[in-house]
Amino acid sequence: MNIVHVIDFEGNRNLGISEFGVVTIENFKIKDTRVEHCSNFFENYLEYFLSLRRSGILAAHSAQTEDCLLRHHWPSPGSVPRFVDDGSTVSWGPWIDTKLVYRRLFRGLISYELQDLIVSFNLHSHLSKLAKQYCSFSAMNFHNSLFDALATALLIQNLPRYFSNVSLQILLSLCKPKDA
């Protein structure tokens, strides 16, 4: 599997992005993490987000939210690789959306919210260990950007337990609209 950058933003279009967390995974292993409290200075991180998109696919839980926030600040990353073929795109996507992936692979769950999936798949103790390793003490709970990005990355890492042939292409195909 190629490099995937799991992103979570705290904030919104009206108030701005106050914080972001990024977890980079490669071959289902965490390679890097970053958290920034940026309040009014999110625009200063354009080069960072461009470097992420140039080096891998972006992922999020309910990715439409993160995509919308990125496009609000920067409509396009310019020409970037698609990573699923030799082509390029001028989009922040395609995105791996763990909410869509889990909804399509594990039908019938009561909820597909991030916190509920962590509980449903018995991943909370593993998430707690990751949080102790990467998060500040006050940010070791949901609705903190790095914690949520770690939880989303953990959902991606969890998939090979159930499916032996998980690949970037398969994950992205699960995120396409059903009529595409």
Image: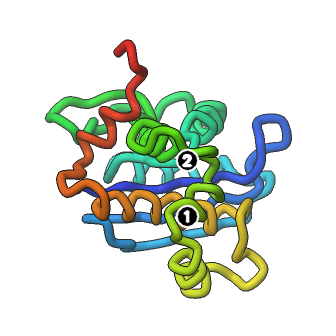
In the picture of the structure, the residue carrying the numbered disc 2 is: 61
Helix, strand or loop under label 1: helix
Q: In which quadrant of the rendered image does the N terminus lie?
A: bottom left
Question: Which one is earlier in the sequence, the residue at label 1 or at label 2?
Answer: 2
Q: Would residue 27 be found to the left or right of residue 54 on screen?
A: left
Q: CA distance from mark 1 to mark 2?
A: 9 Å
User: Do callouts 1 and 2 mark residues in contact (Cβ within 8 Å)?
Assistant: yes
Residue 68: x and y in percent read 62, 32
Q: Would residue 30 be found to the left or right of residue 84 on screen?
A: right
Residue 40: x and y in percent read 79, 52
Looking at the picture, tell me which residue is in the foreground, 86 or 143: 143
Looking at the picture, tell me which residue is in the foreground, 77 or 176: 176
Tell me which residue sits at (64%, 48%) in the image.
113
In the picture of the structure, the residue carrying the numbered disc 1 is: 151
Amino acid at the residue labelled 2: His
- Mark 2: few, some, or many residues within 10 Å (few <14, many ≥20)? many
Helix, strand or loop under label 2: loop
Tell me which residue sits at (26%, 46%) in the image.
168
Amino acid at the residue labelled 1: Ala
